[in-house]
Image: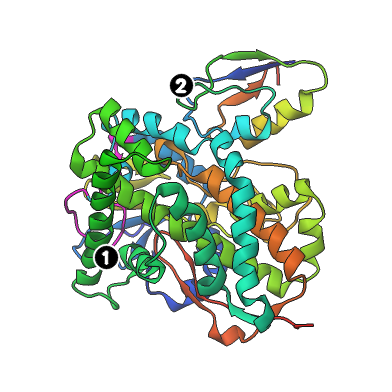
Amino acid sequence: MRVLIDLQACQGHGRCAAVAPSLFQLSSEGYVVTPVIDVPEGLEDDARHAVANCPEMAISIEGE
Amino acid sequence: MSDVAPEIPTAKLDLDLDERFLADPWGTWAELRSEHDIFRAVPGTPFGESIWVCTRESTIREAYKLGPEYFSNQILFPYLPPGPRVLGLVQMDPPEHTALRRAMSPLFGPSVIDAMRPRMHEECRRIIGEFIGNGECEFVGDFAKPFVAAVFMKFLGVPMDRLDDLLAWGYDAVHLTIEQDPDRSRRAAALGNIRSLMAGLVVERRAQPEDDLVTAMLRVAEQTNLSEDDLHGTLVLLFSGGLDTTAGSLSFAARHFAENPDDRPKATANPTTIQNATEEILRAFGILNATKLVIKDAEVGGCPIKKGDRIVLATSSAGRDERVFPDGDQIRFDRDSYRNLAFGLGPHRCIGSHLARAEIEVFLEEWHQMIPDYHIADPSAIHTHGGIVMGIDHLPLTWKVN
């Protein structure tokens, strides 16, 4: 599973890092820095949790 | 109203003064939503401009998407005239806003807030301990405001020795209606008092840095070339924003759990249900009616929005939007996570959202451990306020003392 992040849409609310800290690292300014994240096995639910929580709808699962 | 074309959706709503709205904001929103995704509110501003109110998540997102080219944050209150910028960050528009917001966001990030949790638990238990033996309290004044103030004022760097003054200024700066403050002099005085306090702290921290937000903001101001005026204004914003927004959410939560004892164990069963319950409170009891000034003619939900009008993005209504949450009036703590717009959207979304969530979570856990059974002493004594940030002013609770 891969997670795609629309970095233009990201407003730095940090909700992804709060609900799925093992997947999302934020820059020193609080923004997601990488547009694609490979989801390690076992963290698929965390990834979906982050998708569901982003207020800006900036996160998606590749192919979904 | 002869100048208004008949197809313009119009409805009566005064966010500050409508008795029906103050008594039941979410019931009123449900009625308004059933008629209009967006409508022109009557009355408009006291100066003759229209106030447009977006009730649906889709129209709110549509407006946010148009963004600051059309909708400016320089006026935040639907019924106030334009004036000089007094609240720094929140009244700025991009690109000026962008650099400052980026520099400030990390000060309120999830890891910073998580580190404060042990102190939040301590403050929460200490404050409840002060009145638990009485078998009653006025929740807003005895708990919600002192708790939020104890957590936030220390974080900000404001001494707590004049708490009653601080709370009164914080209230007057945001919530006074035109009936309570016809010439807006009380609001101006409160803002002036907060500004003097902040300006004084800036002088002190320049001489002697501390581990607090005022000191951190001195570094931010240097990095971003922030004017002294906007530094003070931004600190005034943090002061008032940090105090009574969360107190409002806590009070609506307390009213819900006082009225629905069966929901208490469901909400507080474990850390996950506490987090879900916090989301559910934020969704179902949204308090924000973010207001912006229209600076360029626009169309939202098919309505012609004119330069000079105000637009209210009622995220307090969006949390109950049937198209997004089909059973939105049901308060449930087994929902899967979902996005909600309780903190707004876009670049101006609440910078303190992680702190607010943590405060609600700590309240749910500690209160119900210490006072598991309680009820509202006199429902007719409950007072609420509306406006851009809704809340309860008076909520008397009682419980049995062993």
Magenta residues (range): B68-85
Residue position marked by numbered label 2 in the rendering: A8
Residue position marked by numbered label 1 in the rendering: B190
Say above or below: B276 vs A37. Answer: below
Q: Residue at x 70, y 48 (%)?
A: B275
Q: Residue at x 24, y 71 (%)?
A: B186
- The reply, left or right, for residue A40 in relation to residue B35 is right
- The reply, left or right, for residue A44 in relation to residue B322 is right
Q: Residue at x 27, y 56 (%)?
A: B197
Judge by depth and name the residue closer to the eye, A41 or B119.
B119
| In this rendering, the label closer to the viewer, 2 or 1 | 1
- The reply, left or right, for residue B253 in relation to residue B372 is left
Say above or below: B22 vs A20. Answer: below
Q: Residue at x 41, y 53 (%)?
A: B241
* Residue at mark 1: chain: B
Secondary structure at numbered mark 1: helix
The N terminus of chain B - image quarter: bottom left
Residue B110 among magenta residues: no
Q: CA distance from mark 2 to mark 1?
A: 39 Å
Q: Give residue B341's position: percent from left, percent from top.
A: 54, 46
* Residue at mark 2: chain: A
Secondary structure at numbered mark 2: loop
Identify the image quadrant of residue B397.
bottom right
The C terminus of chain B - image quarter: bottom right
Q: Amino acid at mark 2?
A: Gln
Residue B71 among magenta residues: yes
Q: Give residue B114's position: percent from left, percent from top.
A: 61, 40
Q: Give residue A43's position: percent from left, percent from top.
A: 78, 23
